[in-house]
Image (spheres, coloured by chain):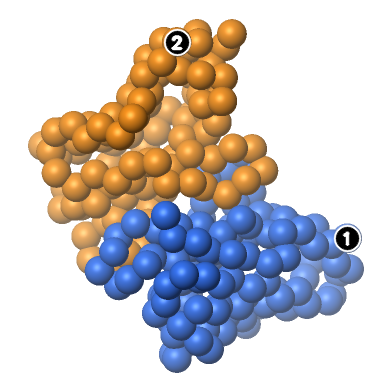
Chain colours: A orange, B blue
Amino acid sequence: QKEVEQNSGPLSVPEGAIASLNCTYSDRGSQSFFWYRQYSGKSPELIMSIYSNGDKEDGRFTAQLNKASQYVSLLIRDSQPSDSATYLCAVILTGGGNKLTFGTGTQLKVEL
Amino acid sequence: GAVVSQHPSRVICKSGTSVKIECRSLDFQATTMFWYRQFPKKSLMLMATSNEGSKATYEQGVEKDKFLINHASLTLSTLTVTSAHPEDSSFYICSANPGPMNTEAFFGQGTRLTVV
């Protein structure tokens, strides 16, 4: 079992819709979770961090964490074509200091 | 967010030569920086953790003599790819956290290395 798993996609949504990106992790002791956006040929950009169970909202983005289910998700409301990118889920594993373990990423395509 | 600057953004070198990549934290001090490699359509793979004033910690399978890391100051880490070969062609990215207690990592722009 991979430490951090994501569906590779592509996930296609129409403009204006809600995009839902999912991530599961294997280390039950993990406490820190992150979503990064990566455009093709560019480096990752931090979108959200979440540490507690529940929802965390920032603009059009909402991160959801469920530690019991070892599941973290990212919702993008009112999706725009500019949101088309690969979304990387990252987790700091137990005892990992600040070392991030990444999922393989989900490619999101927002269609006009 | 915090600013991490990486240079160069793109480099082409001949097989057998060495290439140095710089990673700077511009508005904070970083005792630790991280170096990743990313192949096309793949995720980021951590290569090593760069520690200011001490030896880097390399991930399993990464050759420390091939990928030399130096972290001589609190704002600069360098990665040198020695005796580069075409299979070393990749996207190399560094990251740093603005403070040891800050878990949010910020990434440099990345360096596209092509070895011909």
Asked where in the image residue A61 lies, by quadrant, the reply is top left
Disc 2 crowd, CA 10 A, few/some/many (<14, 14-19, 20+): some
What's the residue at 27%, 42% (across, down)?
Answer: A25
- Which amino acid lies under the numbered mark 1 shown in the image of this protein? Val
Disc 1 crowd, CA 10 A, few/some/many (<14, 14-19, 20+): few
| Residue nearest the viewer, comparing B52 with B2 | B2
What's the residue at 42%, 55% (across, down)?
Answer: B1
**B11 relative position to A63: left or right:** right
Asked where in the image residue A52 lies, by quadrant, the reply is top left
Numbered mark located on residue A16 in the image: 2
Q: Is residue A51 visible?
A: yes
A75 shown above or below A50: above
Numbered mark located on residue B116 in the image: 1
The chain containing the residue under callout 2 comes to A
The chain containing the residue under callout 1 comes to B
Callout 1: SS:
loop
Question: In which quadrant is the C terminus of chain A drawn?
Answer: top right
Alpha carbon distance from label 1 to label 2: 44 Å
**In the rendered structure, are the residues bearing label 1 and label 2 in contact, judged by CB atoms less than 8 Å apart?**
no
Q: Position of residue B64 (x, y in %)?
A: 57, 79
**B63 relative position to A77: left or right:** right
Callout 2: SS:
loop
Question: In which quadrant is the N terminus of chain A drawn?
Answer: top left
A67 shown above or below A13: below
- Which amino acid lies under the numbered mark 2 shown in the image of this protein? Gly
Q: Is residue B46 visible?
A: no
What's the residue at 36%, 26% (across, down)?
Answer: A60
Q: Position of residue B25 (x, y in %)?
A: 50, 71
